[in-house]
Image (spheres, rainbow, N blue to C red):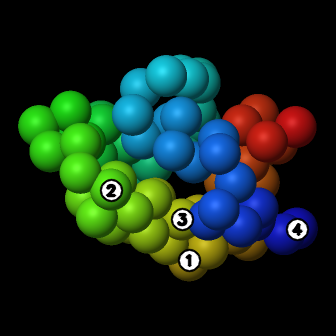
Amino acid sequence: MDIPSKTNKTWHDIITGKKTFQLKFLATKILLGRLVRAAKEDPSPENIANCIDELYAIFANNIKMPSVQDDIKTIFG
């Protein structure tokens, strides 16, 4: 399974809270909560990009887990 590019607008929408999803992977849920708060506190393009990098990395590092694969399908279809 491939993870969509970090340039995909959906990453930005998730980090900024414009889109929300029911995720299965607990580590992603916890990280995402922190990242959304961080993005609200500092909405600069650099911070948003750093948050996207962190979220992308947790998916990339755990791509073999079924719950992560389900979450990617949920988010990106």
In the image, residue 65 lies at what x, y percent?
69, 63
Q: In the displayed structure, would residue 22 be above or below residue 39? A: above
Q: Nearer the viewer, mark 3 or mark 4?
A: 3
Instruction: Name which quarter of the figure residue 75 lies in.
Output: top right
Q: What type is the residue that disc 3 sits on? A: Tyr
Q: Identify which residue is drawn at 14% across, 45% down.
A: 42
Q: CA distance from mark 3 to mark 4?
A: 14 Å
Q: Nearer the viewer, residue 37 or 74?
A: 37
* Residue that protrudes farthest toward the front in the picture: 45
Q: What type is the residue that disc 4 sits on? A: Met
Q: CA distance from mark 1 to mark 3?
A: 9 Å
Q: How many marks?
A: 4
Q: Nearer the viewer, mark 1 or mark 3?
A: 3
In the image, residue 4 lies at what x, y percent?
76, 61
Which residue was labeled with disc 2? 45
Q: CA distance from mark 4 to mark 2?
A: 28 Å
Which residue was labeled with disc 4? 1
Circles 1 and 3: CB distance less than 8 Å? no
Instruction: Name which quarter of the figure residue 59 lies in.
Output: bottom right
Q: Residues within 10 Å of mark 3 (few under 14, many from 20)?
A: some
Residue 56's disc number: 3
Which residue was labeled with disc 1? 61
Q: Quadrant of the N terminus?
A: bottom right
Secondary structure, mark 4, is loop
Q: Identify which residue is drawn at 24% across, 42% down.
A: 43
Q: Give the mark nearer the N terminus: 3 vs 2.
A: 2
